[in-house]
Structure formats: structure tokens, C-alpha cells
Amino acid sequence: MQLNGYYQFPGRAAREAARLTLNQRHLVLDCNEQRQITLLNAITVTDALGTIPLTLTFADGGRFVPEDDAAFRQWWQQQRRPGLVHRLEQHGRGVLLTLLATLAAIAFYFWVILPAASRILAEHIPAYIERQIGQHTFTLLEHSGFSSSRLTPEQQQRVNRLFSEAISPELKEAPTPLRLKVLHFSGGANAFMLADGTLIVSDDLVRMAKSDDALMAVMLHEAGHHEYRHVMRMLVRSSLVSLSYLWLTGDVSGIGDTLLHSAAFVDQMKFSRSMEREADAYAVAQMKAQGRSLADMVAVYRQLEQSAQKEGGGINLPEWMNTHPDMPARIKAIQAAE
């Protein structure tokens, strides 16, 4: 049996007209006055999927697509038992059940297995790796406009005193101990954690906080990130998500690469919002245990929301596009805990 078609040489994008001669033991490929003889069991043929033409792949990576797909299918099915995908196509209910099972397995992996794996792996990462990551991050901050605090000595003493009073000894004496750095930068009122336990507080946040309890609420929120190892969990999960999407989609490029990063981005936004809620709950519990004012916590959150809107030009993004949950919902949760 002879079939005309197109052959793609290994490592080339262009296709050449070719002819394939078939028998039960071997194939003969004629293309560009070159002849290639290959044993039948040395080639792979794609699974039959709808009307998508079957493709023959040779051991060296060359590929042949027959013009008469129906004739080749009939011949191939006589030589080999149809694959699982083809057999499933013959049973509509089986296809639907398989699709649902696949979607359920993917959802279970990303919503259950990934968070658990991220938490377990983050808890077993050696402290020296966290310190290295934190030190590299701090070096990048110094090269990105972050500099020593410009607060008065009295203001800096106030922040250090509050930090010493409110942060638990367990966090200060952990393998990656929590420590405070007050820095000047142009990003406005802000605070965030590094992987090595460094709590960064901006000069503008110290100036903005109207009371000790307001400033302490923000620092306790960031301490919650360290308590639950959110920074390392985010780094681990980000790596696992990228590797998982790559494994599911194969070698990505072009539109595939865009979809990969978009899906990973949405997943990370959701994960980040859950961590923010967890850190809020930690801060509320610590504020109540220390007899501090949750009303001041609400007040500073409102100030931070107004500052963020001002910095962002008043644009309100939907929650699913934010790293933080909707601020009114967070404030309502704090008020409910009073």
C-alpha cells in the first residue's frame, strides 16, 4: 500500500512532499530522492482523536502526515489495536465520565495537594536557605531605592520598643528569627516580610499610624506571615504551579507560554489572598491577647486602603485580580472579632 503525504525532517519546520510504502513489517519513505526504510515497530502513531489526521513519528524525530488519512487509519487499525483514546471516543458516556474525572483530579491537585505540599515542603526547608533568599532579596531592595530610615531617633526608638513588646519570644528565637528593619522608600506606607524573617516597615507607615496599636496591628499582621511561613510557602507553591502546568501542557511557547503564566498568576492571586486572611486572623488574636484596640487596627487598614487607591490612581480591581482580599471585607471581619 502506498500513500502520498508530507514529511517533516527532524529539526525543520518546512514540510516536503513524500510517499510512504506500507507493509506488515516495515515502511519505505521516499522524499527528495532519498529513501528511508524503517521497521514498523520503530515508529509511533498518534492516537486517533476525532478527525485530526494521524501522524507517524520516526525514531530520528521526522514526521509523516498522509493525505488520505482514512485509508491509513483503516490499514493501521488492521496492524494495531486502537488506542485507549480512540476506544473511549466510541462511547459518549465514557468520554464524559473521563472528562469529569480528569477535571476533578486537576481541581483536587491544585486545591488540595498543592497547598498541602507547599506547606510541608516549606516547613522542611533548611533555615540557611531561607537566610540566603532573604539576604539576596534585601540586596535587591537596596539596589531598588530602599535606604536607611530617615525617621528621628525618637520615632525609631518607638518602633523598636513596640516590636520588642508585642512580638512573641518564640518568633524572635526561631531558627529564622523575626527581626525589624525600618527603611525609607518611595512606595508609600507599607510593611512586608522577607523569607529570612526580616520585617520591613516603611518610614511613611510609621508617620501614618495615629497610635501605637495601629502600628502594632500592621507589624503583627506581617508577623503572622512569618508564623505561618507564608513567604516560603508562596515561593514553593509558585515553583510547583509552574512545573505542574508545564508537565500538563508539555513544552510551552507562544500562546501556550502566555496561558501558562496567566493560569499561574490567577492561582497565585487566590493563594495570596488566603494567606492575607490567615495573617489578619493571627494579628486579631494577638491584638486581643495583648489588650490592644481593634478599632485602631480598623483605622489603619482604612488609611492603607486610601493610600493604595491614591497610589493606584483610584483604580479598584476585582478581588480575583488582587493579591489582597477586598479591604471592606477584611475590615468587617476585624469588627466582627471585637
Image (cartoon, rainbow, N blue to C red):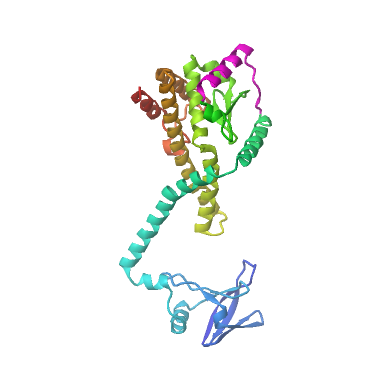
Q: Nearer the viewer, residue 290 or 187?
A: 290
Q: Residue 229: where, in percent of width, then height?
A: 52, 37
Q: Nearer the viewer, residue 328 or 49?
A: 328
- Return the residue found at the far left: 93
Q: Residue 297: where, in percent of width, then height?
A: 44, 21
Q: Is residue 302 left or right of residue 239?
A: left
292 vs 325: above or below:
above
Magenta span of residues: 145-167
Quick check: can you spot residue 30?
yes
66 vs 262: above or below:
below
Image quarter in which the C terminus is found: top left
Q: Is residue 337 magenta?
A: no
Q: Is residue 153 magenta?
A: yes
Quick check: can you spot residue 255?
no
Question: Which residue shows up at 55% across the image and 16% down it?
Answer: 207
186 vs 51: above or below:
above
Q: Nearer the viewer, residue 167 or 33?
A: 167
